[in-house]
Image: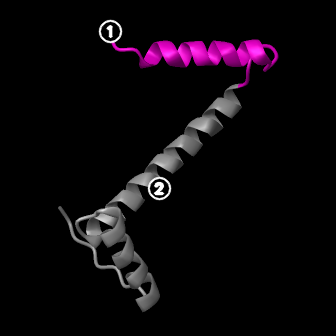
Amino acid sequence: MSTMNISLPDGLKAFVDELVQSEGYGTSSEYMRELIRRDQDRRQFKEHLLVGMRSGTEGPMDAAFFASLRQRASSKRKLP
């Protein structure tokens, strides 16, 4: 694993230290890794949304359309 040093103003360091204590992180590094993972997930989700928006839809986006989406998503979550 590589290391990276990050300089923070005193107020931000105190904030991170407080969250590490209150949220159960072992170290400030664990907290920072979690923030970075969340940012990666958010960016990936945004990209998926953009791809979906660009793909267009066939027909109206009405209640039946969303019911169909829920059905497909539900069936993909089930394990064999």
Q: Amino acid at mark 1?
A: Pro
Read off the magenta span: 56-79
For residue 63, above or below residue 10: above
For residue 80, above or below residue 35: above
Q: Name the mark on residue 4.
A: none
Residue in the foreground of this view, choosing between 18 and 31: 18
Which mark is nearer the camera, 2 or 1? 1
Which residue is painted at 35% across and 63% down in the image?
23
Question: Residue 3 appears in which quarter of the rendering?
Answer: bottom left
Q: Secondary structure at mark 2?
A: helix
Residue 80, percent across and down? Answer: 32, 9
Residue 51, percent across and down? Answer: 62, 34
Nearer-N-terminus badge (2/1): 2
Residue in the foreground of this view, choosing between 18 and 3: 18
Q: Name the residue carrying label 1.
A: 80
Q: Secondary structure at mark 1?
A: loop
- The residue most toward the left is 1
Which residue is painted at 55% across and 14% down in the image?
72
